[in-house]
Image (tube, rainbow, N blue to C red):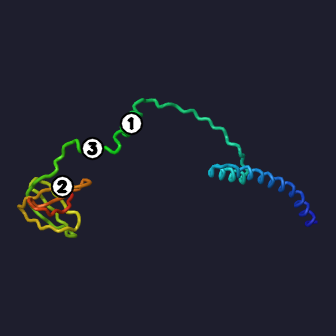
Amino acid sequence: MKKQLLSLLVLLSAPTFAAQTEFNTQALQACSFIENDFNRLLCYDNTVAGKSLLKPSVTKKLTPPTTAAAPIQVKEKVDDFGLEHKKEAQVEKETEIKAVVTSVKEAAYGELIISLDNGQQWRQIGSDSMRLKENETIVISRGAFSSFLLKKDGKNRSIRVKRTK
C-alpha cells in the first residue's frame, strides 16, 4: 500500500516538475542573451530563486539643490586643485633662521635634542651624526616636503630636525 502511494505521488509530481524545469530552462535561455555581465547574473539569480524577470518600475523625483552656494564652493575647490602649495608659497615664509644653541641633550636612541636661545626646541630625525656644543651658532633652513635641516653656521654638513617646542 505504501509503495503504491509513493509511486502515485511520484507520477503526480512528475508533470509539475517537468513544467517547472521547462519554465526555468526557457527563462535561463532568455538570460543568456543579456550582454551585460551584472544584469545577466542578476537574471540567472532571479530565475533560480523563482522571482519575476521583469524589472520593477521605480520612479524617484529628483529635487534641485535649495542653495546656489554649494556649486560655487565645489567650483572653487576644483579650480584650486593642485595649487595648494602655491598658496602657501604666496605667504612669505622665512626660509631659514639663525640661533645660538643653549643646550644639547641626547635622547634614548642617540638623537639630539637642541634648545635654542629664542626658546625653540628641535629634535634630530634620523641617524646622521653631528657634534654640537653650547654657544654655537646654527642655521635651520626649510627642506623638501615641509622638512627642516640644521647645520652649523658656515658649514655644509646638516641633519634633519623637527620642531618640538
Amino acid type indicated by mark 1: Lys
Q: Secondary structure at mark 3?
A: helix
Q: CA distance from mark 2 to mark 3?
A: 27 Å
Labels 2 and 3 touching (C-beta < 8 A): no
Q: Quadrant of the C terminus?
A: bottom left
Q: Position of residue 148 (x, y in %)?
A: 20, 56
Q: Residue at x 50, y 31 (%)?
A: 64
Furthest residue toward left: 135
Amino acid type indicated by mark 3: Lys
Q: Position of residue 120 (x, y in %)?
A: 14, 54
Number of the front mark, 2 or 3: 3
Q: Residue at x 23, y 56 (%)?
A: 147
- Classify residue 16 by image quadrant: bottom right
Q: Position of residue 131 (x, y in %)?
A: 12, 68
- Classify residue 159 by image quadrant: bottom left
Q: CA distance from mark 1 to mark 3?
A: 18 Å
**Label 2 sits on residue:** 165
Crowding at dot 1, Cα within 10 Å, few <14 / some 14-19 / many 20+, comes out as few
Of residues 165 and 139, the one nearer the viewer is 139
**Label 3 sits on residue:** 86
**Label 1 sits on residue:** 75
Say whether disc 2 or disc 3 marks the residue closer to the N-terminus: 3
- Classify residue 155 by image quadrant: bottom left
Q: Position of residue 37 (x, y in %)?
A: 63, 52
Say whether disc 2 or disc 1 marks the residue closer to the N-terminus: 1
Would residue 15 be seen by someone viewing this image from the given angle? yes
Labels 2 and 1 touching (C-beta < 8 A): no
Would residue 101 be seen by someone viewing this image from the given angle? no
